[in-house]
Image (tube, rainbow, N blue to C red):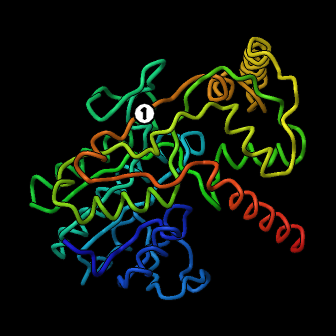
Amino acid sequence: MVVNHCLVSGCTGFIGRHLVKALLGRGVTVRGLTRGPADDIPMPGVELRRGDLARPDTLADITRDIDTIIHAAGQAHAEDADDEVHRQTTVEGTRHLLAAAEVHSVQRFVFISSIKAMPEPGDACLDESDQRLPTDTYGLSRRKAEDLVLDAGRRTGMHVSILRPALVYGPGNKGNLFSMMHWINRGLFPPIPDTSNVRSMVDVRDLVQAILLAAEKPAANGKAFIITDNMNYSTHRIYAALRSAFDKSVPPWSVPAGLLRVFGKAGDAYEAILRRPAPFNSDLCSRLLNSACYRSNCAEQDLGFRAEYSFEDAVSDMVDEYRNRRAMEQENG
């Protein structure tokens, strides 16, 4: 199976932009779906269409002459929206796009879900064999969307595949890694203790490779795959790599883990009393100190997926992009 005419939802996002670049490099005809005014987004070589996944009336003919849909749109971060937004954007948006795909007999549908569609691993390291449900609204909305995709595949015979990427890194990334870069650059990120925790991640270039494999390999049909680079990153390793990319040495001391947990509890109390988000709370503390380990065993076995990059390979380009972005923001006021 070969992708020839591809619709990419979320084409202007972090993953979407890298994916579109790879597709164009392979000579694929790319149609991009965006909620913003299509004329305001410079994407040479892409046929941009304006549409809102939450409004099926805006998706008329969006899938005409398309053989493959890569669905990368959705609420990117759990803390960015309330329950109703997650339902409308992730669940109903996926339902509407699948319906549009069925109208024009699209052959392949790849859904970029999230590792959050799985439960928190705790001290274990999970692979695709773990079928338990997540417990938070964001993860449950992703899982419901996955079920819609799999059901559409069974019902229509369309080739469907689901990818659950771990934390994605690369130039232009947002979320927690961007925040970490920002505060390290400003000299305000505390030295992190080495707790030997394990955080799973994947380079956006490797994720794009996995997306294309999922679209073209018959073995991907009807399956969900975890995508990581299968390396063991501690938060201290990530912190040290970022400091090095900013030409900063790692301090010879670190904030004790116990003290960070105390600060996290204090942030929780602040939020409970004042009903305002605290700059640091127990959830952020957990992400710094605890593990979130996953393995992409099925992706390697069924798709032949092999990650080519590590965080250290990407960090210099990430910091360069961050600096360029900051310089442009300052220049524009």
Quadrant for the C terminus, please: bottom right
Q: Nearer the viewer, residue 147 or 129?
A: 129
Q: Nearer the viewer, residue 263 or 80?
A: 263
Q: Name the spot of residue 332 as percent of width and height, x first.
A: 86, 74
The residue at the point 27 percent across, 75 percent down is: 3
**Is residue 333 placed above or below 146 in the rendered structure?**
below
The residue at the point 23 percent across, 69 percent down is: 101
Q: Nearer the viewer, residue 277 or 203?
A: 203
Q: Name the spot of residue 52 as percent of width and height, x first.
A: 44, 67
Q: Amino acid at mark 1?
A: Tyr
How many numbered callouts?
Answer: 1
**Is residue 24 placed above or below 167 in the rendered structure?**
below
The residue at the point 72 percent across, 43 percent down is: 241
Q: Name the spot of residue 259 as percent of width and height, x first.
A: 80, 14
Quadrant for the N terminus, please: bottom left
Q: Quadrant of residue 25?
A: bottom left
Q: Name the spot of residue 128 as percent of width and height, x first.
A: 29, 35
**Is residue 13 placed above or below 268 in the rendered structure?**
below
Q: Secondary structure at mark 1?
A: strand
* 251 lies left or right of 322: right
Circle 1 sits on which residue?
294
The residue at the point 48 percent across, 19 percent down is: 122
* 204 lies left or right of 96: right
* 182 lies left or right of 229: right
Using a 10 Å C-alpha cutoff, classify the residue at mark 1 as few (fewer than 14 neighbours), some (14 to 19) or many (20 or more): many
**Is residue 299 placed above or below 190 in the rendered structure?**
below
